[in-house]
Amino acid sequence: MMAKKKKIELKDKISIEQYLKKVAKFTGSEYGNMIRSQFKDIKGSSELAMLAAPSAEELEQLRKAVAIMTPDEKGRAADLTDEQIQKIAADAQIEPANLAIFINGYALHCKRVSSRTNCAGYSQSANETARGSS
């Protein structure tokens, strides 16, 4: 029984690259456009829908940022600081807010999916462990 559980845990792990592919799924599709239109603000932008259906431009920015990340940054993407995210965005010459939304979405995905073992390099902080958060 234990071997089966371990196999499931390994199958569920997701890297930042895999998460990017997941986010890209509805880019430019009819469904993606519908989602984005539901989240438009009075200016016509829909940043809140970026993780459900990024625009082609947003997706290209995210791909650019992930491509220039070091293996260490990719391995601990869910734990990157705001300063690190801003530096990566500046190096990739992309909108820092889009990268922050993407990285935060990845971190939330890592927290939500299971007990901190499903995202490459994600580690629970000592404070979260002490509080017993999940």
Image: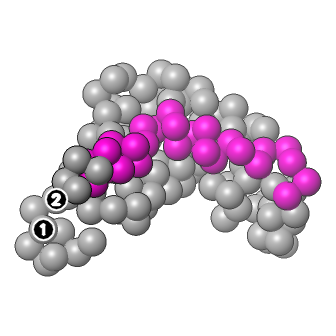
Q: Secondary structure at mark 1?
A: helix
Residue 129: which numbered mark, if any? 1
Q: Is residue 76 magenta?
A: no
Question: Is residue 25 toward the left or the right of residue 81 in the image?
Answer: right
The range drawn in magenta is: 5-31
The answer to which quarter of the image holds residue 128 is bottom left
Question: Is residue 112 toward the left or the right of residue 100 in the image?
Answer: left
Query: Which residue appears at 53% of the width and 49% of the height?
Result: 102
Question: Is residue 78 toward the left or the right of residue 63 in the image?
Answer: left
Crowdedness near tag 1: few (<14), some (14–19) or many (≥20) residues, C-alpha within 10 Å:
few
Instruction: State whether residue 79 is above or below residue 109.
Output: above
What secondary structure is the stretch in magenta mostly built from?
A: helix
The colour scheme used to paint the residues is one colour
Q: Secondary structure at mark 2?
A: loop
Quadrant into which the N terminus falls? bottom left
For this rendering, which residue is in front, 109 or 73?
A: 109
Crowdedness near tag 2: few (<14), some (14–19) or many (≥20) residues, C-alpha within 10 Å:
few
Instruction: State whether residue 14 is above or below residue 125.
Output: above
For this rendering, which residue is in front, 105 or 1?
A: 1
Quadrant into which the C terminus falls? bottom left
The answer to which quarter of the image holds residue 104 is bottom left
- The answer to whether residue 122 of the structure is visible from this angle is no
Amino acid beneath label 1? Thr
For this rendering, which residue is in front, 131 or 18?
A: 18
Q: Position of residue 50 (x, y in %)?
A: 68, 55
Query: Which residue appears at 85% of the width and 44% of the height?
Result: 28
Query: Which residue appears at 22% of the width and 47% of the height?
Result: 3
The answer to which quarter of the image holds residue 51 is bottom right
Residue of label 2: 125
Amino acid beneath label 2? Ser
Residues at marks 1 and 2 touching, judged by CB atoms closer than 8 Å? yes
